Amino acid sequence: MKALIFAAGLGERMRPLTDTTPKPLLRAGGKPLIAWHLERLAAAGVREVVINTSWLAAQFPVALGDGAGFGLRICYSDEGPVPRETGGGMLQALAWLGEAPFLAVNGDVWTDVDFASLPREPRGDAHLVMVDNPGHHPQGDFVLLPDGRLREDGGPRLTFSGIGVYRPGVLQGWREVIGDVAGVDETPPRFRLAPLLRAAMRRDAASGEHHRGAWTDVGTPERLRQLDDALA
């Protein structure tokens, strides 16, 4: 299985830290956030990783190289000065990811999720790791049914962790699903993945699991400090 790490965001909520360093390269526990993912992916048997980049993109190859130091082969999907959002970034990365299911993870989260435990062949187009709602996101995102299916509503919501296994088919018909919003007519297009995930739920093609271990959305300098203290 190959993997995609989303690392193209501007990190605006993390400024001034991200004025000179892209958020996934900020350090916690003595190493860049993205390095924790790379180590766990390698331990799970992943050998090829695509990292999408935009803000301060040139720093990633300098910091991570070609992946050999992690036992991986890293390809960089440079999106230019304007990030393509999660959907557009995934669409562009398919040129490297190929036609098989792949794992994708946000570069600005920290977690102890065992990537090896995630399904290599999701039963639908997407299998999402859900977590308890953090204090900064109490409303949650999606409903996880007892049989593992995901829904937009119909019960208490959990928060999407930013970790999932996808089939390329999750992007099929993306233009019709996304509609006429800003960015879709750009080359390459810019659009979010969330509407496609909701569309997959409506056609019963999205499953999930509840991770009850450690997970942090490192979205602010304070959360980064708290994570660094905990890992230390």
Image (tube, helix red, strand yellow):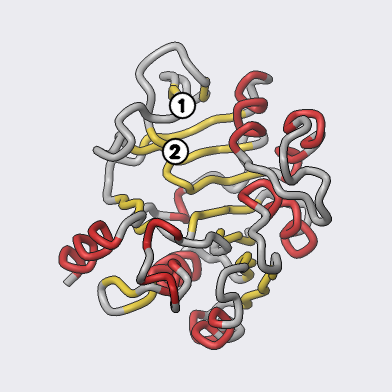
Residue 207 left/right relative to 182 = left
Query: How many residues crowd around disc 1 within 10 Å: few (fewer than 14), some, or many (20 or more)?
Result: many
- Crowd around label 2: few <14 · some 14–19 · many ≥20 (10 Å): some
- Most foreground residue, 213 or 179: 179
Residue 111 visible in the current orientation:
no
Image position of 176 with respect to 112: above or below = above
Q: Secondary structure at mark 2?
A: strand
- Residue 101: x and y in percent read 67, 49
In the drawing, what numbered circle is on residue 66?
none
**Residue 194 rendering spot, x and y as whole percentages:** 59, 36
Q: Considering depth in this image, is 100 or 141 the residue closer to the camera? A: 141
79 up-or-down from 61: above or below: above
> Which residue appears at 60% of the width and 75% of the height?
57
Tell me if 23 is positioned left or right of 102 in this view. left
- Quadrant including the N terminus: bottom right
Q: Is residue 6 visible?
A: yes
The disc labelled 2 sits on which kind of residue? Phe
Residue 49, image quadrant = bottom right
Question: Mark 2 touching mark 1, by CB under 8 A?
Answer: yes
Mark drawn on residue 142:
1
Residue that badge 2 annotates: 160
Q: Looking at numbered disc 1 in the image, what kind of residue is underneath it?
A: Phe
